[in-house]
Image (cartoon, rainbow, N blue to C red):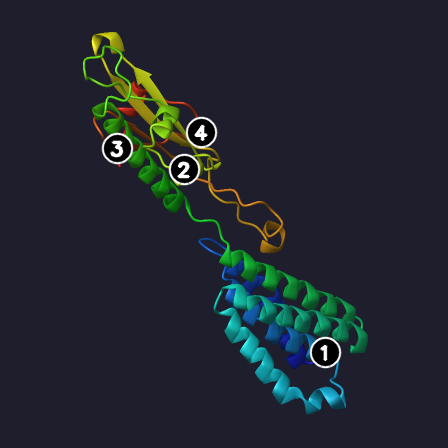
Amino acid sequence: MKSRRQVFLLLLWCLLAGAVPVYANNPPQPDGMLTLVLIFPVVILGFRLAGAKLSEKERKWRVLRGLLLALCTLLTLGGTGIALIPLLVLLGYGVVRGIQVMARGQGTIHKVLGAVVILFTLFAVANYVMSLNYPPEGPSVEHAAYVNLRVINDAEQRFRSDAVIDVNKNGLGEYGSLEDLHKAGLLDEAFWARLQRPIYRYVVVLSGDPARDEKQYFIYATPVHYGRPPHGLSLLRALQTYVPYARRTFACDQTGVVRAADLGGSRAVTGEEAAKWPEF
């Protein structure tokens, strides 16, 4: 028969190993540092509940080991490449302790306790890595699309004012396609490379009769992947390819006014439709 203290510790251990990581992994961003710090109480409580004990040699170096682990935890706060080695140390600590719980523990559930310690450590490390590389929220991706649309719009105005293409040879230039703008040097190579990334799809639609000096254009940018980043276990998402999601489609014409709307998906639009959208 377990004592009340043992039952309390078991419930607390289950809370740390289950409910808290789930909360830490919720939107808007997984709290990787929180789960990383929780490795220590999970290991300590797992040891106690399993009845496992440290060896004499391990007890002798307990203080030094504690200082080393504390230093490793502090170094991971940097969130940069310097955190890789201390992160591996924390990973090794949790996995080794989990194996020791399984090997030295007593009772009927010590193997389960050790397995949970190992799984929690893997989750915590993966969650921390994912929190450093968490996909930017829709507004951040959308703002980049807005800026790109403004750059293309400015390039269109310069393309016409410079009369790069003049059908009537009267000094009144035409508007151009994205390829025309790029070839004219109005969209540099770095910007052109950004447009090729699978984030937003940019389309320029030219209209009017150039022979009669009727010149119009319409630009729109629609998200390649509509929606929001999926939220799930970071241990699983760490193995997935990063996909930048967004929700709003942007449009602009020769007036220079940028408009935006959530179309509920990613599709082609027309100038007449976009004219009814609110200004961004």
Is the residue 34 above or below the residue 155 in the image? Answer: below
Residue 203 in the image: x percent, y percent?
A: 39, 25
10 Å neighbourhood of mark 3: few (<14), some, or many (≥20)? some
10 Å neighbourhood of mark 2: few (<14), some, or many (≥20)? few
Mark 1 or mark 3, whichever is nearer to me: 3
- Quarter of the figure that contains the N terminus: bottom right
Q: Which residue is mark 3?
A: 154
Q: Secondary structure at mark 4?
A: loop
Q: Residue at x 41, y 37 (%)?
A: 189
Numbered mark located on residue 189 in the image: 2
**Among numbered discs 3 and 4, the one appearing first in the sequence:** 3
Mark 2 or mark 1, whichever is nearer to me: 2
Q: Secondary structure at mark 2?
A: helix
Q: CA separation, marks 1 and 3? A: 74 Å
Q: Using the rendered image of the protein, determine whether residue 228 is visible from the camera's viewpoint.
A: yes
Q: Residue at x 53, y 64 (%)?
A: 81
Q: Secondary structure at mark 1?
A: loop
Q: Residue at x 18, y 13 (%)?
A: 170
Q: Amino acid at mark 2?
A: Glu
Q: CA separation, marks 1 and 4? A: 58 Å
**Among numbered discs 1 and 4, the one appearing first in the sequence:** 1
10 Å neighbourhood of mark 1: few (<14), some, or many (≥20)? few
Q: Amino acid at mark 1?
A: Lys
**Among numbered discs 2 and 3, the one appearing first in the sequence:** 3
Q: Amino acid at mark 3?
A: Asp
Q: Which residue is mark 1?
A: 2
Mark 2 or mark 4, whichever is nearer to me: 2
